[in-house]
Amino acid sequence: MMAGTGTAHMRSGQDRVLVVDDLVVEFPAGRGQKVHAVSGVSFDLLDGETLGILGESGCGKSSAGRAVMQLPSPKSGSVRLDGTELTGLTPRTLRTRRKKMQMILQDPVSSLNPRRRVRDLVAEGLSIWGTRPSREQVESVLSSVGLDPAVVWDRRPHELSGGQCQRICIARALMLDPRVLICDEPVSSLDVSVQAQILNLLEETKSRYDLSMIFIAHDLAVVKNISDRIMVMYLGKVCEVTPSARLAGSALHPYTRLLLASVPEADPATDDQAADGRAAGSRSPGGLAEPGEKSVELPSPLNPPSGCRFRTRCPLATDRCAAEEPLLREVGDGHYLACHNMGN
Ligand SMILES: Nc1ncnc2c1ncn2[C@@H]1O[C@H](COP(=O)(O)OP(=O)(O)OP(=O)(O)O)[C@@H](O)[C@H]1O
Ligand code: SF4
Ligand SMILES: [Mg+2]
């Protein structure tokens, strides 16, 4: 494995569907500046696994997801799907390979063509490949995402709820028989009452269609239950990777701990009073200090801090944190940490 980019958490073996190595995404920002959206992120995904990617707004989650899809290709780094390198492929070959990865986005309503009817929206993914699916195929996939074909068949997106539109997006993806589903905040725009239904549907779909999943979210409560492992990102870098079942009890990175402390979660293992106490203490959105708040310097992705990118907000920062980038290292079974001062 490559040294220097924090790849201690990468596994080996045949059952890795996706291997992403040292991904770099940058955007031009005028006057010769660039946004360092993703700076050397690596991860892998086993057959049937769900990897949660967690981090606050702007940390590069979507940029990483899109770069995996080659939408657009990353500035550098490698993305291997079932052993095939996707970066550097010709557009035609890429289109064929990428079919095996489908993305579900945050805003289902606007990701659907408003003029098309459900039957065409679901069929069109396959149609662009020259295969017109049969009516039975479309009806079957609609049923499998919990929609009654007879009811929605002729409807257009504006005649459906947000949750129904997300079901349509999932159906469209399934028509292409993917191996990997990249879900980018798939429930963030939905009513809370609908969120659980869509999360359940994604879990059912994953096992029924034998999928692997990347689940991107800024909301810990959402990502925790659905994921096998969680990768925490901060300002374009990976801070910590841990089995999700052990996140609450064993997280070590000061940023992960900040995220955990800010989420009032209903954890059956925690007694109600303790949970209530936590909730009352810290309910700021995302729980993170807002710009302008005392003693917090929010760094810019245009000019990220040297060494550890979290150091300007870290209560444990030392001189070493400014001088030397902490790389991921193993601190427990399946638990990897990028921090100089924790886990020693
Ligand atoms: N097309 C673009 N052009 C310029 N900058 C961009 C572009 N897309 C993203 N960025 C910047 O890259 C950084 C990472 O953005 P990204 O959307 O990947 O974060 P995110 O973690 O998905 O955030 P959110 O939770 O808000 O969706 C941010 O600073 C963002 O402003
Ligand atoms: S490396 Fe230093 S600044 Fe970064 S999280 Fe650890 S203690 Fe904080
Ligand atoms: Mg995003």
Image (cartoon, rainbow, N blue to C red):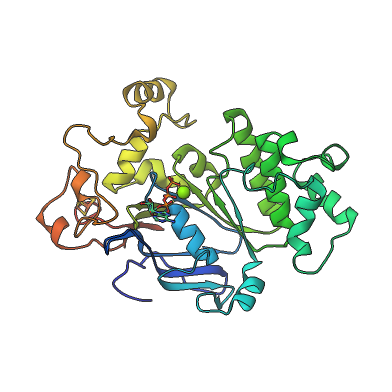
Image quadrant where residue 274 sits: top left
Res 229 visible: yes
Check the image and report above or below for 163 versus 41: above
Check the image and report above or below for 13 versus 315: below
Figure label count: 0
Check the image and report above or below for 87 versus 68: below
> On the picture, is 35 further left or further right than 61?
left
Q: Residue at x 58, y 79 (%)?
A: 90
Quadrant location of the N terminus in the rendered image: bottom left
> On the picture, is 297 further left or further right than 223?
left
Q: Residue at x 29, y 54 (%)?
A: 301
Image quadrant where residue 143 sits: top right
Residue 222, given in percent of the width and then of the height, sits at: 51, 39
Residue 317, given in percent of the width and then of the height, sits at: 16, 49
Res 333 visible: no
Residue 214, given in percent of the width and then of the height, sits at: 54, 55
Quadrant location of the C terminus in the rendered image: bottom left
Q: Residue at x 32, y 53 (%)?
A: 235
Residue 154, given in percent of the width and then of the height, sits at: 84, 42
Q: Give the residue at the far left of this rendering.
A: 319
- The one nearer the camera, 82 or 150, is 150
